[in-house]
Amino acid sequence: MHKFTTFAAGVALAIASVGASAQGGAAFTHRIDHREANQQARIDAGVASGQLTRREAFRLEAEQARIRHAEARAKADGVVTSRERRELERMQREANANIRAQMHDAQVAYRR
């Protein structure tokens, strides 16, 4: 009976740790989604202010779509691994730098 109790406790601990890691993944993807929303708002603001041309906005939007696609692939199996997290973070850092560069270059949208 003692062996069964120890085994049951071990199984319960394993299940709890899997649940905790899954929640950590959900919290991470929430941060990804929040950062993605901020970047999208910056792109929209750049278009509205004329700091981004149509072509620049199109390229930045395509980059955001690639990030969303990579996030969906990472979440498809239910677990976002540390490698997948690092890759998503790298992609978002790059997108952030691209948004900043395009908004502060010499090109402006033509306004009538």
Image (cartoon, helix red, strand yellow):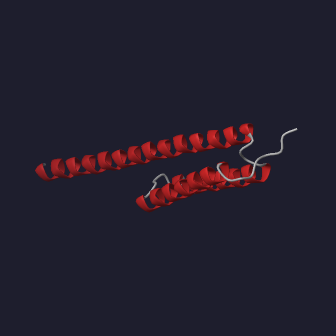
Relative horizontal placement of residue 18, taking residue 99 as reference (left or right) = left
Give the residue furthest to the right: 112
Along the viewing direction, whichever of 53 and 26 lies nearer the viewer = 53
The residue at the point 75 percent across, 41 percent down is 50
All told, the count of numbered labels is 0
Relative horizontal placement of residue 32, taking residue 110 as reference (left or right) = left
The residue at the point 30 percent across, 49 percent down is 17
Q: Position of residue 24 (x, y in %)?
A: 39, 46
Relative horizontal placement of residue 16, taking residue 86 as reference (left or right) = left
Along the viewing direction, whichever of 14 and 91 lies nearer the viewer = 91
Picture layout, residue 105 above or below residue 23: below
Q: Position of residue 72 (x, y in %)?
A: 58, 52
Q: Position of residue 85 (x, y in %)?
A: 46, 56
Q: Position of residue 39 (x, y in %)?
A: 59, 44
Along the viewing direction, whichever of 45 and 3 lies nearer the viewer = 45
Give the residue furthest to the front: 106
The residue at the point 25 percent across, 48 percent down is 13
Picture layout, residue 87 above or below residue 44: below
Along the viewing direction, whichever of 80 and 11 lies nearer the viewer = 80
The residue at the point 22 percent across, 51 percent down is 10
Image quadrant holding the C terminus, namely top right
Relative horizontal placement of residue 52, taking residue 90 as reference (left or right) = right
